Amino acid sequence: MRAPPGWIYGFAVLSALACASTVENRVLPADEQFAAAIEAYESGEYQKAVTALQAFAFNYPQDPRNVDARWLTAEAYYGAEDWATAAQEYLNFQRDYPAEARAPEALYQAGRAYQYMSLRPELDQRDTERAINVLERIPVEYPQSDFVDEARERRAALRNKLAEKVYLNAEFYFDNDEYRAAEIYLVDLIEGHADSSWLPAGYALLAETFCQQGLAVRAAEVFSRLRESFPDSQATAEADDRLPEDCRQLLPETGPVPAARSDAAADGR
């Protein structure tokens, strides 16, 4: 028996592939599509879930379950630890459904996602700042939300991280004898991060910075503020040991002034 012509064989193969592709990519009914997405999500197959959820939203844009699909898409990216995409999906959800019950949680989750991307204090802190900016919106936009207290706690921890970075910058310049640069960072720490746990260390290093510049009176003023505000801190004890006496004791006619003042006139420069 003669073999069929090659073109017939090729046509048969292409037809079979086309049929298989049609079966594979056929549009499922809405209920089946949504159920498949939920099953993938609950099984921890987050990328598969995202694909199914996005297909559902594309094929059934008027289905009321699209709100849930949008939420689960953000949750799936979060579960997959794709923090940047998760944060954006949560923010998009809140933007598109600001009155939805999960809107404040969406902001909170976006803040958490950015927090996961936040680097060590000595490195770039843009994601830390993004997290702070998002978390700050919750008490303003949703003051009755259950996430207000948690958002404030996270914000405080992140703000403290920014303060640590400022302190580390100041310490770097101090260690390299760049005292004026160190002074600028320390004044920024004291003025901009008054609620930070790094404040005592900031005052102590600022006193040393002034002392190293030969500004004993200014150093004593800062040390006086440190001792007055944080009498039991480790930074106070260490400054008491490290500062020369003339940088710790104010002259009788000199009173303490706010340490954050760092203009040339105050220093007599």
Image (cartoon, rainbow, N blue to C red):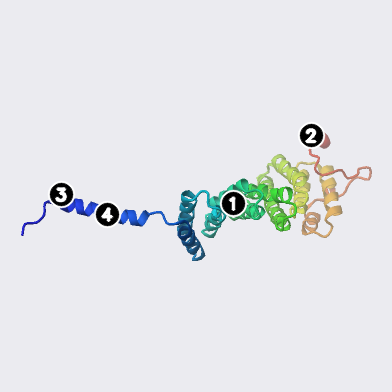
Q: In the rendered image, which residue does mark 3 sit on?
A: 7
Q: Which three-letter amino acid code belongs to the residue tagged 2?
A: Ala
**Sooner in the amino-acid sequence: mark 1 or mark 2:** 1
Q: Nearer the viewer, residue 52 or 230?
A: 52
Q: Could you classify mark 1 by the number of other residues whose Cα lies within 10 Å: few (under 14), some (14-19), or many (20 or more)?
A: many
Sequence-wise, the earlier of marks 1 and 4 is: 4
Distance (Cα) linking label 3 and label 2: 90 Å
Mark drawn on residue 264: 2
Q: In which quarter of the view is residue 146 placed? A: bottom right
Which image quadrant for residue 109?
Answer: bottom right
Q: Estimate the x, y position of residue 250 in percent, counting from the top left.
A: 88, 46
Query: What residue sits right under mark 4 in the picture?
Result: 17
Classify mark 2: helix, strand or loop.
helix
| Secondary element at tag 4 | helix
Of tags 2 and 4, the one toward the viewer is 4
Q: Earlier in the sequence, mark 2 or mark 4?
A: 4
Disc 1 and disc 3 in contact, CB within 8 angstroms = no
| Residue 124 in sight here | no
Type of amino acid at the residue the image marks with label 1: Tyr
- Residue situated furthest right in the rendering: 253
- Amino acid on which the number 3 mark rests in the picture: Trp
